Image (spheres, rainbow, N blue to C red):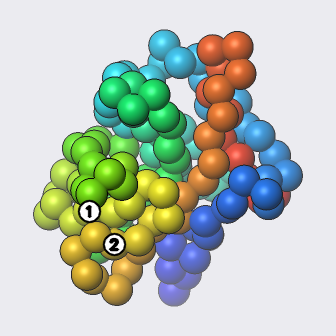
Amino acid sequence: MENILDKYKSVSINEVTTWFKAGNIKDFPSNRGGCIKYKDKQIAVFNFERRNEWYACQNACPHKMEMVLSRGMTGSADGVPKIACPMHKKTFSLVDGSNLNGDDFSIATYPVKVVDNEVFVGFLE
Ligand code: FES
């Protein structure tokens, strides 16, 4: 059976081949997440207004494969922006996707840029 997580791989800004327009900044709530679809991927996009930063990651939580990370709670741990899954509170770095609980699963992260109030997420395809 195909693992739904197989299609999610982190993309660094240097690898981006497609900047996908995710929406206008008004479409994303402050300090919370929104969910977009790119091809067969669900991507959570976070407007960290209090840090004046944007982040994107897979919407699927690798713990139980729930499509929920966009509804998680944003915060920071030792200065690292993080997302806590709303289901069982596993937390992940939004910088490199690492698991901050010490579990061995992580998430894919994607670059975000804002140009003229439009939000773009970078993909490698
Ligand atoms: S489904 Fe996300 S922490 Fe369990």
Identify the residue at horizontal 72%, vertical 53% (top origin).
13
The tag earlier along the polypeptide, 2 or 1, is: 1
Neighbour tally class for label 2: few under 14, some 14-19, many 20 plus, Cα within 10 Å: some
Q: Is residue 94 above or below residue 49?
A: below
Residue nearest the observer in this picture, 46 or 70: 46
Any mark on residue 61, and which?
none
Residue 91 is marked as 1
Q: Is residue 56 left or right of residue 60?
A: right
Say which residue label 2 marks: 99
Q: Amino acid at mark 2?
A: Asn
Residue occupying the far right of the picture = 17
Q: Determine which quarter of the picture holds residue 51.
A: top left
Image position of 59 with respect to 98: above or below:
above
Quadrant of res 71: top left
- The residue depicted at 67 percent of the width and 61 percent of the height is 11
Would residue 83 be visible to someone looking at this image? Answer: no
Q: Amino acid at mark 1?
A: Thr
Q: From the image, which quarter does the C terminus lie in?
A: bottom right
x then y, percent, for residue 42 = 52, 50
Residue shown at 50%/43% (left/top)? Answer: 55
Query: Quick check: 114 above or below 13?
Result: above
Compared with 124, 101 (above or below) is below
**Residue 44 place in picture, x, y as percent:** 46, 45
| Residue 91 visible somewhere in the drawing | yes
Say if disc 2 is inside 8 Å of ligand 1.
no
Give the class, few, some or many, for how many residues have Cα within 10 Å of label 1's Cα (few <14, many ≥20). Answer: many
- In the drawing, does residue 111 fall left or right of residue 80? right
Q: Residue at x 50, y 72 (%)?
A: 5
**Residue situated in front as seen by the camera: 67 or 46:** 46
Callouts 2 and 1 close, C-beta under 8 Å: yes
